[in-house]
Amino acid sequence: MLIKYFVCLLMCLLMFAGCQTTKVAYKKEYSRYVNNLAILHYPESPQMKVNIRNDEMFISSLVAGPAILPQLMMLLAKSSANEEDSVAFNEIIFDLNIGDVLCEKLNTKFQLCSYFHVVPQKSIVKDQAVWKLLEKKDKEVKDYSQIGVRLGIDTILEADVLSFGIKDPGIFSDPYVFMEIDVKMTTAAEGTVIWRDTVEARTEIGVSTLDFVDMVYTDTEYLRKKLEEVTDAVSELCIEKMGFDTNYTYLLEEDYIEKSKHKINVAEKLPELNLLRYENLITKAEYDEAKSNLIEKAKDRNAVVSVDTATDKTLSVDTAARINPEVK
């Protein structure tokens, strides 16, 4: 019996080891060869995992005592309850594609902290041929090459959400939101992997499990906000692992927009500007200069700048109007 136990344990360890991501360290010199980047994710949206029953099961497990059968029954009950919670919470956010949210976050951050020209996410979704190729997790060289040609890029970053959701560590801790992703950067021409890593992040919810659950069922946006926070955190970690830091590029302080009504919301304006570049309504040079202008104006804490004037003065009146519809 003991031999069988060790055999099973060894098989589990081997299976676990086989599931680990093969990491490839990112080298700073790779940045010199990245000019046009597309950020992709797999179309299938993963299900959120919920594990928030540790508190309420704690006392029950003590009452059950050391007997094996009652403890097993408790574990089964806990597992069943967590599955029910997962189903209920996923129904609440049924229209939220966490992969889309992650790619949008990464897209904006790359634009802010690097010179890479990044393909707008809206343009990627519109291309049916590319969308079909996204479904393949094990892509071949020809697949990467086709994506590169269709999107006009030299580098591809694939983001795969391995797991995300809510956990409650136990009776002495509050619940938190977590996310784990697999990021893989490849060249579009040869499909050569130049960076691959598993990135994890967690953000505290700040309230007890019971209060959080009550809040979720009365305010769906609260849950969405927490999921967006952890998505932002994991995307920021990706940027840091590549040697960049968005904190030096634009303001990330809490309630930034609320506190500064006349400041520029760079994270909102930049994707609009990038879409114009990709659709050839403005040139790459105009985009680069307008982006620099936006960031510099947003950094100026003393200046009162209207969002409507946050465009490059060298752009034509028509182009400025496209970027800022309210500009006359």
Image (cartoon, rainbow, N blue to C red):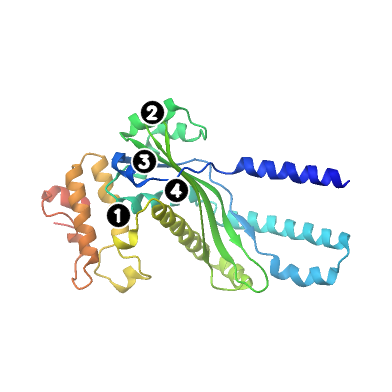
Q: CA distance from mark 1 to mark 2?
A: 27 Å
> How would you rate the neighbour count of disc 4 (Cα within 10 Å): few for under 14, some for 14-19, many for 20 or more?
some
Give residue 82's quadrant in the image: bottom right
Residue 249's place in the image compared with 103, above or below, is below
Residue type at the position of mark 2: Ser
Observer-side mark, 1 or 4, equals: 1
Q: Position of residue 312 (x, y in %)?
A: 15, 54
Which badge, 1 or 2, comes first in the chain's sequence? 1
Q: Nearer the viewer, residue 28 or 214?
A: 28
> Which residue matches tag 1?
112
Give the secondary structure at mark 4. Answer: helix
Q: Nearer the viewer, residue 67 or 41?
A: 67
Residue type at the position of mark 1: Leu
Residue 155's place in the image compared with 76, above or below, is above
Observer-side mark, 2 or 4, equals: 2
Please give the name of the residue rendered at 69% of the width and 55% of the height, measured from the top-left corner: 83
> Which residue matches tag 2?
145
> Which residue matches tag 4?
100
Please give the name of the residue rendered at 46% of the width and 35% of the height, measured from the top-left corner: 134
Give the secondary structure at mark 1. Answer: helix
> How would you rate the neighbour count of disc 2 (Cα within 10 Å): few for under 14, some for 14-19, many for 20 or more?
some
Q: Position of residue 322 (x, y in %)?
A: 20, 49
Which badge, 2 or 4, comes first in the chain's sequence? 4
Please indicate, yes or no, whether residue 282 appears anywhere in the rendered image.
no
Which badge, 4 or 3, comes first in the chain's sequence? 3
Residue type at the position of mark 4: Asp
Residue 242's place in the image compared with 191, above or below, is below
Q: CA distance from mark 2 to mark 4?
A: 23 Å
Residue 65's place in the image compared with 41, above or below, is below
> Which residue matches tag 3?
38
Q: Position of residue 206 (x, y in %)?
A: 54, 72
